[in-house]
Amino acid sequence: MENGAAQQPQAAYQNPERILQPAFYELNETFDLDTNQLILLEGYKECGHPAVPAVQPYVFDRDRLRKLLAFLDNPEGDGLYLCGPTGCGKTSLVSQAAARLHWPTQMVPVHGRLELDDLLGQKVLENGNTPFLYGALSTAVKEGHILILDEMDVADPSELAGLYDLLDGAPLVLAQNGGEIIPVHPRFRFVATGNSAGAGDGSGLYQGVLRQSLAWLDRFRVIAVDYPDEFTELMILNQVVPNLPVIVREKMVKLANEVRRLFTGGFDGKAVEGESQLSVTLSTRGLVRWAKLSLRFQGAPRVLEYALEQALTARVEPAERQAIHRIGHDVFGDLWSSGVDS
């Protein structure tokens, strides 16, 4: 099968010590919030399950977290689709919520050749036998995991049509395994992410994005995700690279937002007349990469420029690279040349 990442060894979930048991977590403590409400969230007891994502530094947007937790609590027959620009935190929003609730998650990176059988599973040759190896979808439905189809909008809509009945509440039928019927576990959740809203990519920025079937999209509730605001991105950098000087972190966020402004101006007319327009952007993921590399190479000559080239500008056209580095010089002033020790 094309997508080996979609396959999970069946034996990985047979360890008695890793049997999933329900548990409840308090909202404020679990997600580092400060509200005046006592809210309990259902998850699983910590048991070292291999499919539970690792906890990483993450700053949750309250509104998006509220919508996600409402879906995880009771999807009411819906799937969840998170759409937004590259690197804005769509997938990490779900995976980091799952990590804190100890909720096993099956992650499937979608590509244009993904077939339904890649998700369901297949028979394999093993010591002269042909046992059935359950795929990510079958495992999630059977065990009560979260399934994430990452970049779902590059999938062939005709392949996804085979999942309509599942999202309508029907059991999963594995014709490949003698017609095995898997009832849908009450804690199974179907989540997808994409750079488009499902209607194709009019900007031309995301190669391979396909227009998805309206019948398929109608089965999802939608959360629109954008880049965090300046305060939130500063909080992210504070967690990830606390040893970088505060002034450097602040100016990194300022540069990222200036690059994004010139990027969006290139496609929706927001740029000021006469300004250079950019065909690339500095995502939150790219911003974190830049910050980490700046700390890693701290002490090197022109370290901010050196790290930014590795994080972003080495892959853009020379004219745009010069434009972005010129923005860096304008934003950082003398720091651009003196480095992060100043």
Image: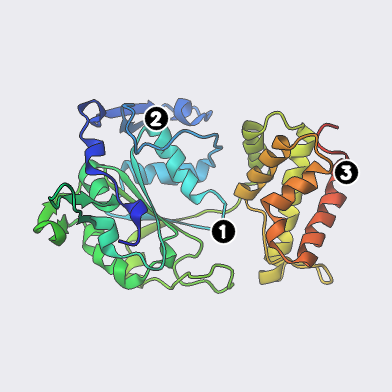
Quarter holding the C terminus is top right
Mark 2 lies on residue? 39
* Mark 2 or mark 1, whichever is nearer to me: 1
User: What is the x, y in percent for residue 155?
Assistant: 39, 67
Q: Residue at horizontal 60%, vertical 48%?
A: 285
Q: Amino acid at mark 3?
A: Ser
Q: Residues within 10 Å of mark 2 (few under 14, many from 20)?
A: few
Question: What is the secondary structure assignment of the residue under circle 3?
Answer: helix
Q: Amino acid at mark 1?
A: Pro
Q: Residue furthest front?
A: 128
Question: What is the secondary structure assignment of the residue under circle 1?
Answer: loop
Residue 294 in which image quadrant: top right
Work out whether 268 lies above or below 239. Answer: below
Name the one closer to the observer, 72 or 110: 110
270 relative to 22 in the view: left or right: right
Mark 3 lies on residue? 337
* Label whose residue precedes the other's in the sequence (1 or 3): 1
User: What is the x, y in percent for residue 227?
Assistant: 60, 51
Q: Are marks 2 and 3 in contact (CB under 8 Å)?
A: no
Residue 103 in which image quadrant: top left
Work out whether 341 lies above or below 150. Answer: above
User: What is the x, y in percent for residue 236?
Assistant: 62, 37
Name the one closer to the observer, 75 or 320: 320
Mark 1 lies on residue? 85
* Label whose residue precedes the other's in the sequence (2 or 3): 2
